[in-house]
Amino acid sequence: MTDSADGRRMRLRVTSRPASAGAHLARVLDTGPMLGGTFFHPPDPTVAFLYASRADLLRLGALFRLAATSPHSALHVPAPPGPGPLNTRTTPLLVAREDTGLRPSDWPALRRGAHRAAAPLTVIAPAPRPAERPDEVRRLADRRPARYAEHAGTSFVLARPELLFWMGDSLTEAGESVATDREMHRRGESYRDDWAGFFDPERTGDPMHALCVVAADPLFHRARRRQ
């Protein structure tokens, strides 16, 4: 579950589980307990929330970029045990390129066979790029945004590879900005981004309009309670 930087490329330990669903999907990469500080609250009704510690934001950013560059892999982030930061339900999160052919309805069968031939795997994620993108990339995202769905108690984000890579860079940027953020030290959490440009329900029929990314560190929450 450890990670290290090599020229800003991150090495991560995951569990690889073979998959037989989808046109091209070959494996599901399960993060296990590595992202224990990450909570995904699905849209209620149209805005979702992703709460994660600084370390988890950096790992998530790397994993989103890995999913973006792998046409045969999906990324599975289990929901941690216990309640999340908000008084609403949490779900696991499954992230994949749309060209893997993965459909949310495939997930129950994938989940039932998830423990067969599971094996630990060390992956190396691509290095991040600046989160800002040229106007032509933004126009492409407007024409074909990411798709959100929920099925069998799991949330899904499916998108073109360049959009997943962009999401990964945004998560990395959010994680890197936490160290100097005064709100984190004052309140134990800090709003970082809203991802409103990645999802557009008016064009896709998705229930999610925006995903709010919030950095939250239990260490600062505990310190605040002691005060």
Image (cartoon, rainbow, N blue to C red):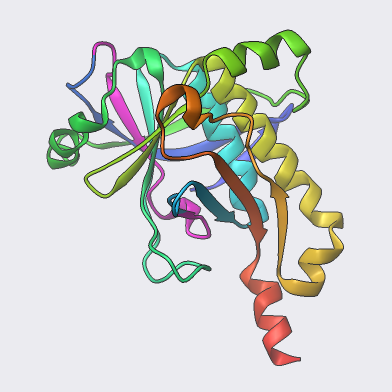
- Residue 152 vertical position relative to residue 10 in the rendered view, above or below: below
Q: Residue 18 vs residue 166: left or right?
A: left
Residue 140: x %, y % from top left: 61, 11
Q: Which region shows up in magenta?
A: 23-40
Q: Is residue 179 above or below residue 183?
A: above
Residue 184 point in image, percent of width and height: 77, 65
Q: Is residue 70 above or below residue 80?
A: above
Above-or-below relation of 87 to 68: below
Residue lying at the far bottom in this picture: please name it: 227
Residue 162 within the segment the image draws in magenta: no
Along the line of sight, the residue nearer the viewer: 202 or 44: 202
Left or right placement of residue 197 versus residue 121 in this view: right
- Residue placed most toward the observer, 219 or 194: 194
Please tell me in which quadrant of the rendered image residue 25 appears: top left
* Nearer to the camera, 183 or 69: 183
In the picture provided, is 183 more to the left or to the right than 156?
right
Which of the 4 image quarters holds residue 191? bottom right
- What residue appears at the point 37 percent right and 12 percent down from the top-left corner? 99
The number of numbered discs placed on residues in the rendered structure image is 0
* Along the line of sight, the residue nearer the viewer: 160 or 11: 160
Left or right, 12 with reference to 113: right
Q: Is residue 37 magenta?
A: yes
Q: Position of residue 183 (x, y in %)?
A: 81, 65
Residue at the (58%, 42%) spot, across then down: 59
